[in-house]
């Protein structure tokens, strides 16, 4: 089976790295990728793994010249399934697949929050365009039960929605004391320092400013932030204003293979985002044996109680986060049952089953 994945960009991001992680587990599927914009580090990783990657060179959301180019690429590739990822790719990719005569079109909704999509506030126009393009596809994949409910509330027919959760390579995130020492030495973190961690795009919705203010109220605590984004300068200024510029370490955006070592260097993981579609970084932190405090995480909240005893939901104010920053005296926690529900090989099998189903219709 030949499958083309169409994605908005291939910089370092959750959806992009999820795609890179999935493809090696899809045995029997010949996968190709086309990125509309930004053939970044994830494109390099895919090519190194032998996956063909094309760059469409799209100049913006309204670059309609991209549509015939994408249509020709799909038609000439004779693909059995077109699978789109992220808003812009879903809108253009579904239409291009239809024009190219591909009947099996799958779209994954990675980042639909209660009031935003991919970190941007939802508008009526964005929602209407999304729904119009959704009807051109065959099936829409939700990464969590929460996202499935949001799609149904929007007006997507429940029969067209399939839940295939995000996944991780569980073993790769196992706590490594040697990596802990090496990463702390590289980043200038003392061996005995109490390190609070956060992972994600430095964007307003992640609310890292709340985390900086909370860490400022805990004497001696350090903050290790992993990610890059448009809020970086503002957050650095806030750290200086709070008097903790010397206690915040900025790791920047890192490829997927660099994250396990950074998680090993942390003592507590905190997610202050109040609107998530899944909460992948939280699952990765639990796989690393970290105690976790979070404001929103459908990946955990959709599960039966007790499957992630090391994780606790908290309120979203600075005072709430400060109260949650108490150190855990255990070196590492056992990997909870919740993590094993989100094994990447399992997610890949579910997607391949969906491909078989939609290509036979």
Image (spheres, helix red, strand yellow):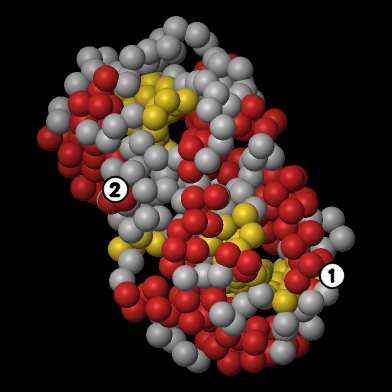
Residue at left offset 58%, top offset 44%: 256
Is residue 359 placed above or below 354 in the rendered structure? Answer: below
Give percent across and percent down for residue 150: 45, 59
Is residue 66 placed above or below 118 in the rendered structure? Answer: below
C-alpha span from label 1 to label 2: 42 Å
Neighbour class for label 2 at 10 Å: few (<14), some, many (≥20)?
A: some
Residue at left offset 49%, top offset 63%: 151
Q: Between 357 and 30, which is closer to the camera in this rendering? A: 357
The earlier-in-sequence mark between 1 and 2 is: 1
Give percent across and percent down for residue 346: 74, 45
Residue 286 is at least partly visible in this image: no
Residue named by callout 2: 232
Say which mark, if any, is on residue 1. Answer: 1
Is residue 356 placed above or below 315 in the rendered structure? Answer: below
Which element is circle 1 on? loop
Examine the image and state in which quarter residue 359 appears.
bottom right
Residue 192 is at least partly visible in this image: yes
Is residue 330 placed above or below 213 in the rendered structure? Answer: above
Total marks in image: 2
Residue at left offset 22%, top offset 15%: 219
Give percent across and percent down for residue 94: 59, 80
């Amino acid at each position: 089976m030949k499958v083309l994945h169409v994605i908005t960009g291939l910089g370092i991001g959750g959806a992009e790295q999820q795609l890179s992680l999935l493809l090696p587990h899809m045995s029997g599927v010949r996968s190709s990728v086309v990125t509309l914009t930004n053939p970044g580090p994830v494109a390099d990783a895919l090519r190194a793994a032998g996956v063909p990657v094309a760059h469409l060179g799209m100049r913006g959301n309204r670059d309609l010249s991209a549509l015939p180019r994408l249509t020709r690429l799909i038609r000439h590739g004779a693909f059995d399934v077109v699978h789109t990822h992220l808003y812009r790719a879903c809108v253009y990719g579904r239409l291009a697949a239809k024009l190219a005569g591909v009947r099996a079109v799958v779209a994954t909704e990675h980042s639909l929050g209660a009031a935003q999509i991919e970190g941007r506030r939802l508008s009526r126009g964005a929602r209407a365009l999304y729904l119009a393009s959704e009807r051109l596809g065959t099936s829409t994949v939700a990464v969590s039960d929460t996202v499935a409910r949001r799609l149904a509330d929007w007006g997507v027919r429940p029969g067209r929605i399939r839940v295939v959760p995000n996944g991780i390579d569980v073993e790769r995130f196992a706590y490594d004391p040697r990596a802990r020492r090496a990463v702390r030495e590289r980043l200038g973190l003392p061996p005995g320092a109490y390190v609070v961690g956060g992972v994600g795009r430095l964007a307003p919705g992640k609310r890292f400013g709340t985390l900086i203010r909370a860490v400022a109220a805990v004497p001696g605590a350090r903050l290790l932030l992993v990610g890059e984004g448009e809020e970086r300068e503002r957050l650095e200024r806030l750290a200086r204003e709070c008097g903790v510029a010397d206690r915040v370490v900025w790791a920047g955006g890192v490829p997927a293979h660099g994250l396990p070592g950074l998680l090993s260097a942390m003592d507590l993981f905190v997610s202050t985002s109040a609107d998530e579609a899944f909460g992948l970084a939280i699952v990765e932190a639990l796989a690393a044996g970290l105690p976790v405090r979070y404001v929103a995480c459908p990946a955990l909240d959709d599960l039966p109680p007790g499957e992630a005893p090391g994780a606790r939901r908290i309120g979203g104010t600075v005072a709430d986060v400060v109260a949650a920053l108490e150190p855990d005296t255990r070196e590492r926690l056992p990997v909870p049952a919740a993590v094993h529900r989100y094994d990447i090989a399992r997610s890949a099998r579910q997607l391949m089953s969906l491909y078989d189903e939609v290509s036979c219709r």
